[in-house]
Image (tube, grey):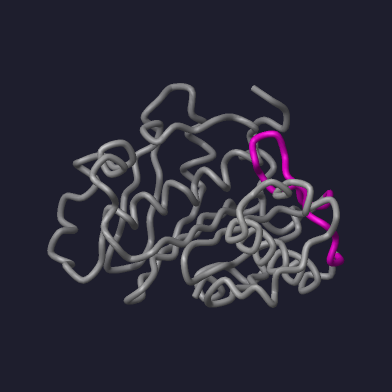
C-alpha cells in the first residue's frame, strides 16, 4: 500500500503480518532488543529485514541499521528512510538523500484511538467535516499523519516536534494531507514543502510524508 503512495525515488518493502521466518537480525541490530519480549524482537527484526531489502532495491547495500539515541533508525550516509510496524503489517521506505530530502511512514490498525490518546494527539478542529466517513477512523488517520510528519522532520532537523506543534489538514477526497506550524519554534518552510498522502483499508491506515530535494528547506543538521 505505501509503495503506491510514495514517489518513485523512494523504495518501499512491506509485508503483511509479523512473520517470524523473516526475523533476521545483524549483531549490531540485535543488541538493541536483547532484553525485549519475543514479539517486540520479531517485530523489530522484520522491520530491519524490510529496511535492508529496501536499501538493496536502491543499490545502497543491505547494511545493518542501528538505533540512534532517540530510537531513530541509523541509515547509511547519503540515505534517508523510515520504518513502521503494527499488528498485521510491517514496512520500510528508503531513498538517496540526493533524490529526497526526508521521508516518514506510518501504519496503524484502522480502529478508533483510545480516548486518552485522541485527546493528546488530535486537535478537535482537525476532524471537522470528516465524521461523515464512518467507515474509517479519522482520529487514527490524523494520529498516523503526525507520526509520519515527525519521522520525516526529526532526522532532517534534529529537533523535537510535539503533537500539538503542528496542525494536520486532511483532504479526504484526494487522500492527501498537509501540516502547518502552531509554534514559532517550528520551521514553517520545512512544513510548507512537506507532501503527505494517506490510504485506508478495512484493517489498516497508512500515511507517508516526504520532502522533495531542496537543500534550502533542511535548515539544521545538528542538535538543536
Residue for point 26% across, 61% down: 137
Give the magenta part as a residue range: 61-77
Q: Position of residue 190 (x, y in %)?
A: 54, 39
Residue for point 69% across, 25% down: 223
Indicate whether residue 70 is drawn in magenta.
yes
Instruction: Spot the residue most to the left.
Output: 132
Q: Quadrant of residue 198?
A: bottom left
Residue in the foreground of this view, choosing between 13 and 175: 13
Q: Quadrant of residue 94?
A: bottom right
Residue for point 37% across, 49% down: 143
Indicate whether residue 218 is drawn in magenta.
no
Q: Main secondary structure of the magenta part?
A: loop
Q: Position of residue 173 (x, y in %)?
A: 27, 68
In this image, 6 relative to 204: left or right?
right
Disc count in the image? Answer: 0
Q: Position of residue 2 (x, y in %)?
A: 52, 70
Residue in the foreground of this view, choosing between 66 and 205: 66
Residue in the foreground of this view, choosing between 31 and 216: 31
In this image, 65 relative to 118: left or right?
right
Residue for point 39% across, 69% down: 204
Q: Position of residue 184 (x, y in %)?
A: 43, 22
Q: Image height check: is 100 above or below 126?
A: below
In this image, 164 relative to 10: left or right?
left
Amino acid at each position: 500500500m505505501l509503495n503506491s503512495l510514495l514517489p518513485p525515488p523512494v523504495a518501499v518493502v512491506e509485508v503483511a503480518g509479523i512473520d517470524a521466518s523473516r526475523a533476521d537480525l545483524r549483531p549490531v541490530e540485535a543488541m538493541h532488543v536483547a532484553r525485549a519480549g519475543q514479539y517486540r524482537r520479531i517485530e523489530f527484526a522484520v522491520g530491519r529485514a524490510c529496511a535492508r531489502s529496501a536499501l538493496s532495491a536502491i543499490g545502497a547495500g543491505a547494511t545493518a541499521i542501528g538505533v540512534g539515541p532517540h530510537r531513530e533508525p541509523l541509515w547509511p550516509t547519503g540515505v534517508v528512510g523510515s520504518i513502521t510496524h503494527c499488528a498485521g503489517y510491517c514496512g520500510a521506505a528508503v531513498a538517496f538523500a540526493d533524490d529526497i530530502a526526508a521521508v516518514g511512514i506510518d501504519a496503524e490498525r484502522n480502529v478508533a484511538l483510545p480516548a486518552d490518546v485522541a485527546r493528546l494527539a488530535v486537535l478537535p478542529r482537525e476532524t471537522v467535516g470528516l465524521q461523515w466517513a464512518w467507515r474509517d477512523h479519522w482520529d487514527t488517520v490524523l494520529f498516523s499523519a503526525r507520526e509520519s510528519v515527525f519521522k520525516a522532520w526529526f532526522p532532517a532537523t534534529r529537533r523535537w516536534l510535539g503533537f500539538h506543534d503542528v496542525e494536520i489538514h486532511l483532504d479526504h477526497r484526494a487522500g492527501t494531507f498537509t501540516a502547518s506550524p502552531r509554534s514559532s519554534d517550528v520551521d514553517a518552510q520545512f512544513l510548507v514543502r512537506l507532501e503527505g498522502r494517506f490510504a485506508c483499508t478495512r484493517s489498516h491506515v497508512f500515511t507517508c510524508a516526504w520532502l522533495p530535494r531542496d537543500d534550502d528547506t533542511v535548515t539544521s543538521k545538528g542538535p538543536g
